[in-house]
Image (cartoon, rainbow, N blue to C red):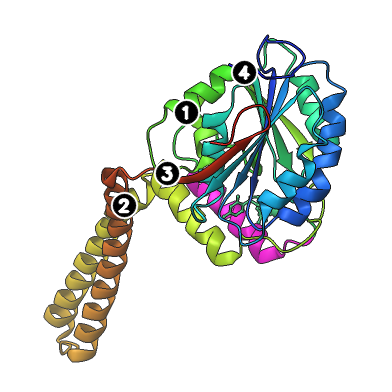
Amino acid sequence: MLTKNNDVLDNRGIELSIILPAYNDAKNVDLLLPLLFTMLAKKQVNCEIILVDDGGKDNLHEVYEKHLNLTPINIEFNLIQFSRNFGKEAALSAGLKESQGKLVAMMDSDGQHPLSVLEEMLEAIQNPAIDMVAAVQETREHENILLKLYKHVFYRFMQDSQRYKLEPHAGDFRVMKRKVVDSLLALPERQRFMKGLYSWVGFKTLYLPFQAQERLEGTSSFNFSGLFELAVIGVTSFSLKPLRWITRMGFLVSVIAILYGLFIIGDTLFFGKDLKGWPTLAVGIMFSAGLQLICLGVIGEYIGRIYDEVKQRPLYIVDKKWNNKKQDQ
Ligand code: UDP
Ligand code: MG
């Protein structure tokens, strides 16, 4: 596991891995690392920190170098640098793949996830009956009503299977045992909607409510359109509801058309009224054409996902890796 020149506590292997995905968050990582070092130094076990630079424009490597000499003896400190920005889900997957710990924790690198909650989660997972502890974010004050509604609709829409439950507002801030990590890594899909995958793999999960803090520096990378894109990936990867709705809508429109047809026939036969001319026709054609385009769009979304999957491209490309216990790779 560890190299010959390691100076960690002993060679019993890594007990805890902490994964930190970072995109343009170097300043925040700079503030977070000393706190994390202090916390981990107190633990009398081997730990590792895996910092994933998701193609940020700021120089995260400089921050890594700056803290390298201050790294406590029981910490293996890694930096993985992507060749470009691949997104948070890819960064988390890279961290999971690299991790060696018996316990693996993931947290944002922008300071929004309090270390006190991480401690609580690490405490809770000591229970042998629990395999994963996930922090559930209580409503963020700055979120407007539109965003709250959007999230509510999204979670309702996503819940497709009765066999596993998608816990609303439980994100990537969580701690898992090795068997959960291995199960996640065994999933071959490229469209990695992690929040769904955690639920899909199952295992006994404890949900801990927490209040997210304000970002230390900078702004969130997930604006409304970013969230919408993630939501579409989530829905198309986990739910067939939109396709079923298309079928239902088709039936509904057909029934309306038949009833309307009968009404026109009756109106003409029994009341001798003239057939309503082109306005009815025009509205009917436009309505059904619009509906068909929407349906095609939804089907296209699923086909697009299949196309992405069959291309079999890697999830991310690693440019460089650094590790304080091994040579540069
Ligand atoms: N992040 C990332 N790649 C991206 C976007 C974000 O690795 O393409 C990281 C980011 O550095 C942070 C975490 O994911 O550590 C959460 O991102 P952000 O704070 O922008 O989102 P929010 O907190 O609003 O969900
Ligand atoms: Mg954040």
State the quadrant of the N terminus.
Answer: top right
* Amino acid carrying mark 3 in the image: Leu
As measured in the structure, the alpha-carbon distance from the residue carrying label 2 to the one carrying label 1 is: 23 Å
As measured in the structure, the alpha-carbon distance from the residue carrying label 3 to the one carrying label 1 is: 12 Å
Q: Position of residue 161 (x, y in %)?
A: 44, 34
User: Which mark, by number, is residue 315?
Assistant: 3
In front: mark 4 or mark 3? 4
Dot 2: element: helix
Q: Is residue 90 visible?
A: yes
Q: Nearer the viewer, residue 235 or 178?
A: 178
Residue hosting label 4 = 2
- Tell me which segment is drawn in magenta: 142-158
In front: mark 1 or mark 4? 4
User: Which mark, by number, is residue 302?
Assistant: 2
Q: Quadrant of residue 143?
A: bottom right
Compared with residue 229, is residue 135 higher up or lower down, i.e. above or below? above
Residue hosting label 1 = 185
* Amino acid carrying mark 1 in the image: Leu
